[in-house]
């Protein structure tokens, strides 16, 4: 079946798309105010145990959905095997989810769960392939799915991954497997991102999938340094860290972070082949409505 | 080879505390090569246990023996008498060797003196690295001879994860990203096309996921 989510429909048009992110907390409530995201955000990703154990992305996706926000149900291959993944996907369809982002997830040692075993029964490309099969009415083993199943399939790409040839090979594979849209790791250096996007365009991939550039409103220099030290996929230029550092106190740094992000969004808007922006707002949701409105 | 490392002496003392006559039983194969459980290490462990016994008043009586292979009946037989005389055996073989001894001497407590760590190679003096996860269905031919099951922290079969860097893995700064190595190797041998093919979900049944494994060679059975 063809997915008919608001995100899917919007991707078919010419509108510059904004998506945002919600990180569930280690708790039993979803207290986020849906209004925080503003009216320009088409859908909100719900992370799957992103920085440690937190409420399941499926339950939190349902909570957002009930609050009038269209969720992008994130699902990672680190913690669940193909049995659990397909089972949760069927459950997600039942609960009304129409978008899924297929990821491998940070290694558990990076999220404070280093004593845990991981699963990695399948990888993210194989997960995309499975969801595509499910969209065609079948589970991986060929079992026919009873009822309707239709998910818009998303995947991630890291523009910073070098060498570029390997990066594009990898992205091509995700798109060939069935990724309808791609959300990237945060862009902090637009010139570097342009080089990547041009390679993606030259490989003919922007015609086959919708690319949404990730942007991240940093809260301050300390957060920027922490992210860059912990995760290899965040490449944050020294100039940005210095700008945050010299902005002043906590509040001033946070404001500067939003300002930097707004500048990045404005530079990204007109890049050929870019379909929109994904605001990696996890834990900083209050900035979304400003960022998605600023650049209109 | 199988690579292992010795448990700490305080750990071994705790394990052996209830016993008096202890046989420290070494193995002459993999664990000798990786300097963890051969004749030399048996001697070192025994000396350390004797010292600990004296200091802590434990009355250990330590006997030492190293046989060629603890995973082979022919060689285990050579240790039968010393094992019978001992109250307990501290085996410095890999986990397979420890269990082989325990199974053949059901009345005797047999303890592991080592932590069996992986199947690997000696990279440079004093440095061993893991190379094979014994997944039971080798795919090395598809990846330029570099195993993504063993050497990629996420067992990715279709390319690197987003955290890959040219100089390191997402997980540890001192480990290379297997996918960077695979990419370079396939490029060097003109097989980069292989990376374009989608590798389907792996069948883990031949691995430990299918339960304890057994190999039967009918052509070798009498």
Image (cartoon, rainbow, N blue to C red):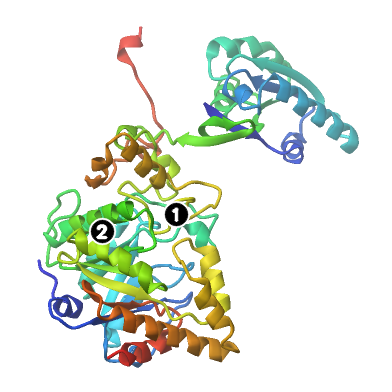
**Residue at the (16%, 75%) spot, across then down:** A8
The quarter in which the C terminus of chain B is drawn is: top left
Picture quarter containing residue A79?
bottom left
Q: Which residue is mark 1?
A: B165
**Residue A36 in view here:** no
Q: Secondary structure at mark 1?
A: loop
* Residue A184 x %, y %: 33, 68
* Residue B93 x %, y %: 61, 25
**Residue at the (35%, 44%) spot, across then down:** B183
Q: Secondary structure at mark 2?
A: helix
Q: Up-down: is B112 above or below A6?
A: above
Give how far apart the Cα atoms at labels 2 and 1 are. 31 Å
Q: Which residue is mark 2?
A: A86
Picture quarter containing residue A282?
bottom left
- The chain letter for the residue carrying disc 2 is A
Please state which of residues A179 and B37 is positioned toward the viewer in this rendering: A179
- Badge 1 density bin: few <14, some 14–19, many ≥20, Cα 10 Å: many
Please state which of residues A42 and B63 is positioned toward the viewer in this rendering: A42
Please state which of residues A93 and B133 is positioned toward the viewer in this rendering: B133
């Amino acid at each position: 079946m063809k997915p008919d989510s608001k995100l899917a429909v919007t991707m078919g048009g010419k509108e510059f798309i904004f998506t945002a992110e919600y990180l569930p907390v280690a708790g039993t409530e979803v207290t986020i105010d849906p209004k925080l995201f503003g009216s320009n955000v088409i859908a909100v990703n719900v992370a799957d145990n992103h920085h440690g154990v937190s409420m399941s992305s499926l339950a939190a996706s349902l909570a957002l959905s009930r609050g009038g926000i269209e969720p992008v149900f994130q699902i990672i291959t680190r913690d669940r095997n193909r049995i659990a993944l397909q089972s949760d996907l069927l459950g997600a369809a039942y609960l009304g989810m129409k978008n899924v982002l297929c990821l491998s997830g940070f290694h558990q040692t990076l999220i404070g769960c280093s004593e845990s075993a991981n699963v990695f029964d399948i990888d993210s490309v194989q997960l995309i392939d499975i969801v595509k099969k499910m969209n065609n009415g079948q589970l991986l083993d060929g079992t026919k799915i009873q009822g309707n199943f239709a998910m818009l399939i998303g995947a991630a790409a890291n523009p910073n991954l070098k060498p570029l040839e390997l990066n594009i090979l990898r992205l091509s594979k995700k798109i060939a497997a069935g990724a309808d849209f791609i959300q990237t790791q945060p862009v902090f250096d637009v010139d570097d991102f342009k080089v990547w996007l041009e390679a993606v365009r030259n490989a003919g991939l922007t015609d086959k999938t919708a690319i949404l550039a990730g942007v991240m409103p940093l809260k301050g220099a300390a957060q920027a340094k922490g992210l860059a030290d912990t995760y290899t996929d965040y490449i944050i230029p020294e100039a940005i860290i210095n700008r945050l550092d010299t902005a002043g106190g906590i509040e001033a740094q946070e404001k500067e972070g939003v300002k930097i992000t707004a500048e990045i969004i404005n530079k990204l808007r007109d890049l050929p082949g870019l379909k929109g922006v994904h605001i990696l707002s996890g834990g900083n949701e209050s900035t979304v409505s400003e960022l998605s409105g600023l650049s209109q | 080879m199988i690579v292992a490392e010795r448990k700490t002496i305080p750990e071994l003392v705790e394990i052996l505390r209830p016993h008096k006559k202890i046989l420290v039983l070494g193995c002459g194969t993999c664990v000798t090569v990786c300097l963890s459980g051969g004749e030399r290490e048996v001697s070192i462990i025994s000396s350390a246990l004797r010292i600990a016994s004296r200091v802590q008043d434990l009355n250990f009586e330590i006997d030492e023996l190293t046989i060629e292979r603890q995973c082979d009946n022919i060689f285990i037989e050579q240790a039968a008498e010393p094992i019978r005389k001992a109250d307990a055996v501290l085996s410095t073989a890999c986990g397979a060797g420890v269990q082989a001894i325990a199974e053949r001497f059901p009345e005797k407590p047999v303890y592991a003196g080592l932590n069996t760590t992986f199947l690997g190679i000696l990279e440079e003096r004093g440095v061993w690295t893991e190379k094979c996860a014994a997944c039971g269905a080798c795919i090395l031919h598809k990846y330029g001879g570099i195993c993504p099951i063993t050497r990629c922290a996420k067992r990715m079969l279709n390319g690197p994860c987003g955290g890959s860097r040219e100089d390191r893995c997402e997980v540890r700064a001192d480990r290379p990203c297997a996918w960077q190595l695979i990419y370079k190797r396939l490029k060097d041998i003109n097989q980069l096309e292989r990376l374009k093919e989608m590798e389907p979900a792996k069948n883990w049944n031949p691995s430990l996921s299918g339960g304890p494994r057994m190999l039967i060679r009918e052509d070798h059975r009498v």
